[in-house]
Image (cartoon, rainbow, N blue to C red):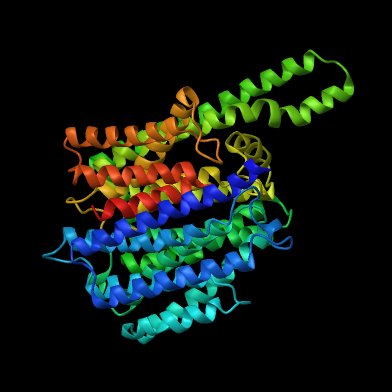
Amino acid sequence: MQTSFASMVSLPLLEGVTIWVSVIFVIAGCFEHSLLSSQHIICIVCWFLTQIVIMIWRTVSRLPGSNSTQSSIYRPGVDDGLWCCLLVPLTVLGGITRVYKTQKESHSLDAATLSNDLVFSLISSTTVLSSSRHPCLAFTLVWLLPLSVRLEPVNIVLLVLLCLSSHLCVRRIPVILPKSFSVGEIVVLVQLVSLITWRSVSCLRHLLMGNNTELPQDVSVVAVIGFFSAAMATTAALYFYNNRQPLFFFVTYGVVALVLAFPALYLYLKMDPISWILIYLFTKQKRIFLLLYWLVCSVTAVAVVWITKFDDNRRISRMIQTDSHPLNYIHIKNIAPRTQVESRHSTVIRKYFHFLALGVYAPGLILDVSFLFLGSVVALVVLVLLEAIRVAKVPPLGPVLDEAFRLFVDEKDAGKCIFTHIYLLLGLSAPIWISYSICNTVSLLPLYSGVLSLAVGDTAASVGGSLFGRHKWPGTKKTIEGTLCCVLSQLAFLFLLALLGILALPNVLFLTIAVILVSCYEAFTLQIDNLVLPLLTFALLSVL
């Protein structure tokens, strides 16, 4: 009983300390570069106080994760993860710092745009964390909405709509997909989508006003339009499918995607989207090389999955042959694939894909970041579509995908949907998606946040902890030796990139502190590390 109590108390405490030290680190970095205006300081102070009040209130009232009514809709075996609500505002603050540091002479984004993003992220993060049945939401609006007085009226309306819709999503999505998220995880996902939507609508408004100079690069807008069109198409296909003919699912998806994406892309690009894609692809020879290389990596990944699945089936067949009793045959056929075989390979397969991600993303970051941006969004669309097919059991792919995706399942996939592989892609790509300037050649270090924290650090922590782990952190299975491997591997990777002339490293002391904070957070958090680690890494590396 004492061990269980220590486990429940120590981990959230250690996680909270790590997050708040990271918050202080990021804000101190902003002050060091004199990047915070008076409006920014007021925003951050009010946000700070509001976050503390809301967390205390929710802890005292034990809402939403603790009572028997609501705890059943969240992922079991973890704490609420309320500290995660701080991550997205930190990434915005870090992104602002990076823009000001590297583009002092000619800003690609004006100060008003940066301030708008910061105000939105702070207000949104507090709103989605609040509960409408308690005075936290009113407290949020009273303290933070006056800070948006400098926003244009259109932006204020958009701010209110996005905050209300985000608040609704945080409350309803866990009900629709029970046991798939913790509170902190759903808050982070909704914050990310809201931030991307905020920027996308701003781009669209400038487009309608005929002010294309304030838009980001073509690839960013094309990717955002394509993703939201695919998301709406997936929702429509799932809603109208209802066990009809498989062709109905794919026709619905294709029609909705084309109806939404094609006119919007044509309006923005002023040309046929297919022609634009071909021109974009064949403009640079390295994009052809990257495309072929990624196709080879994809084929390799699929081959590994099917070889592993074949090996599992062969093991199961041997188990069945050793016991001919009919009842034991049924038990082995139904239970063994999950508990005796697949659980043994799940961690190995997932870490293999972490390592493969290093080989996929590193060349893209080195050769062509914008093409990697577009390719990662296409990959996300494909993975979401495949997961929708698997969940809806659309023949003939549905049952096949269900068996293949079981290789990625761990104890964190307690719900109906399997998000492990999608979270990995999100974590690797999020630093690229949320960065203001993906082609800035002065400071590309933050763009490596996903690769650094997941493909290098998380993999090294898992392997090192398995091989050398002897001393465990209090309340967790993770070891101090694994954390040391995480720190050393990330530093070694960064020094290797600097030695090859790919990156210019900042102050080594501050860089080491940032890596240590990320490694400690990897050890202490019970949340999906594929989702939260890259965001914290991006914020810390951006202010160096």
In-front residue for pair 182/455? 182
Q: Residue furthest top?
A: 322
Above or below: residue 117 compared with residue 323: below
| Residue 172 falls left or right of residue 352 | right
Q: Quadrant of residue 4?
A: top right
| Residue 239 falls left or right of residue 198 | right
Q: Residue at x 83, y 27 (%)?
A: 330
- Residue 81 in percent (x, y) is at 54, 56
Q: Residue at x 33, y 84 (%)?
A: 152
Q: Residue at x 27, y 64 (%)?
A: 96
Q: Residue furthest right?
A: 326
Q: Residue furthest front?
A: 2
User: Which quadrant does the N terminus fall into?
Assistant: top right
In-front residue for pair 406/535? 535
Above or below: residue 232 compared with residue 287: below
- Residue 83 in percent (x, y) is at 48, 58
In-front residue for pair 7/264? 7
- Residue 225 in percent (x, y) is at 42, 63
- Residue 309 in percent (x, y) is at 61, 26
Q: Residue at x 36, y 33 (%)?
A: 359
Residue 149 in sight in this render: yes
How many numbered tags mark residues here? Answer: 0
Residue 435 in sight in this render: no
Q: Quadrant of residue 334?
A: top right
